[in-house]
Image (tube, helix red, strand yellow):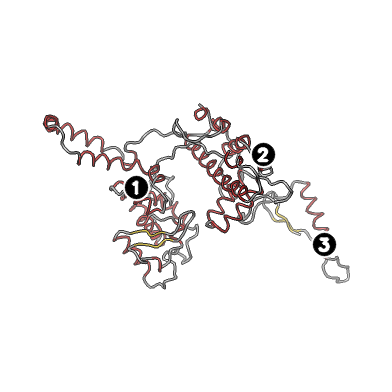
Amino acid sequence: ARVLTADKRYVQHCIGPALDLGRGAITAEHAISLAFDWFDDLEVGGNLSVAGPVVRTDTVNFSPFGGVYTVGHALHDFTIWTKLARSAGGHYNNLVLINRHITSDLIFVPLEDFSARHLQILAVRVIERRPKYGFQAEQGNVTLEQLSADELRRRKRTYNSLITIMRVAFQLAWESGHIQSERPWRSLKRVSVNHSPRLTFLNRDECRRLLERCTPALRKLCLAPLYSGCRVGELAGLRVEDVAYQVYGLRIGPFKRSPSRFVFLPDEGMAFFLSCCEGKTPDELVLRSDMGKPWRRQHTNLFRRAVSQAELPRTFVFHGLRHTYASDLIRAGVSLDIVARQFGHAGTDTVQLTYGHLAEQFREEEIRRKFTPLDAEQQRIAASRSDQLSTLWKSVQAVDWRRYGERPVSANGLSQSSLRTPIEILKAFGPDLAR
């Protein structure tokens, strides 16, 4: 018998002989019984390691039993549907959110009885729990007062994601006849939250510094989103047959919630992807790691090291290359609609909230340059003040372009919100929302 102890050591124990070599032997059933007796002794002594997951979760932590249709039943049925209807990544993200925030407190609540009181329990849980990455141990809880504006904003977005999951799950339960009332899913309301403008992206000099510190394969993986704006998962699955397929660009398959789409490329980007395809068959991957393997998550540590060596902000992650692509286009005057289409977004709302502040300099220049003259007297005054106006123009343009025209941001949404969030939830997220 072998166990893993609390101090992460493997300990083996000889139970008895399996073969009769003159001293007798024990049966398999007897050996199993003795082994569990030994396990029990170690457990009582507190010497065993706490059991943990050994693989990625693939189901809701709930066994659908009993005659009462609960929140757990609804979420279990919902994830069966998402496994078929959604991407693998989207399905897994739903499972992680459900198991982390819902299963411990709300999973056995009868769905017909679900109300704003249960939403308040969920809101408090989301606020108090620290982020957890991978299989790392749980950390202590925090209070609302300990959270920064950005931390509170992220928790609100997590809460809204959970509300979206539960709303679809509860609606499916109602449509399937498991509950008679629409109230459980109609009572689910999101909280208002301001999107944080993206400020961590690179200019061209910083891009070159980063690329110089990359390994050969990582350099290609970094150039790809800078030319296309694609996600790392989309690029990892890109095949030779997807390059220059019907368009001057890339064919991107369905990813997350985005349908398949075409991404158009500049000449420099088209040449880059064509060079990556040379000597490969149509079904081969365009980009591979330095070891010749498909990109999974090997790029994370390599990229973090390159960022450090290039003396870039530690907060800059690989997804920031996608933001860099968008920021460069928007600052050059490309419309938000075109950027949204390149990204695979259904509308411009996300792009407007995330990158809209970058269009301010372009809007400012267009207004100054294209306004039709109106009054001759004011034109003469403007001409006489040309030196003053030119100095003023240059002074404001000297501001860091990433923060140009920046407005103060908070974790809360607009004071006049169309969301009819229950007062219990507003109070949970702080007095500013409950006013």
* Closer mark to the observer between disc 2 and disc 1: 2
Q: Going 78% across and 53% down the picture, which residue do you hit?
A: 39
Q: Give the Cα separation between the discs numbered 1 and 3.
A: 69 Å
Mark 2 and mark 3: Cα distance apart in space: 49 Å
Q: Which mark is residue 112?
A: none
Q: Quadrant of the N terminus?
A: bottom right
Residue 24 placed where, x, y %? 88, 68
- Look at the numbered disc 1 and give the secondary structure of its residue: helix
Camera-nearest residue between 414 and 286: 414
Q: Quadrant of residue 350?
A: top left
Helix or strand or loop: what does disc 3 sit on?
helix
Q: Mark 1 packing: few (<14 Cα in 10 Å), some, or many (20+)?
A: many
In contact (CB < 8 Å): disc 2 and disc 1: no
Per the image, the residue denoted by label 3 is 31
* Residue 18 position (above or below residue 81): below
* First of labels 2, 1 by sequence position: 2
Q: What's under tag 1, amino acid-wise?
A: Leu
The answer for how far apart the CA atoms under marks 2 and 1 are is 44 Å
Residue at (31% x, 43% y) in the render: 359
Q: Which residue is mark 1?
A: 336
Q: What is the x, y in percent for residue 409?
A: 41, 34
Q: Amino acid under label 2? A: Asp
Could you tell me residue 183's position as x and y percent?
61, 40
Check the image and report above or below for 255 versus 200.
Answer: below
Mark 1–mark 3 CB contact (< 8 Å): no
Nearest to the eye among marks 1 and 3: give it: 1
Q: Is residue 217 toward the left or the right of residue 64 in the image?
A: left
Q: Which secondary structure, mark 2?
A: helix
In the image, what residue type sits under mark 3? Ala
Q: Which residue is mark 2?
A: 113
Q: Is residue 299 left or right of residue 13?
A: left
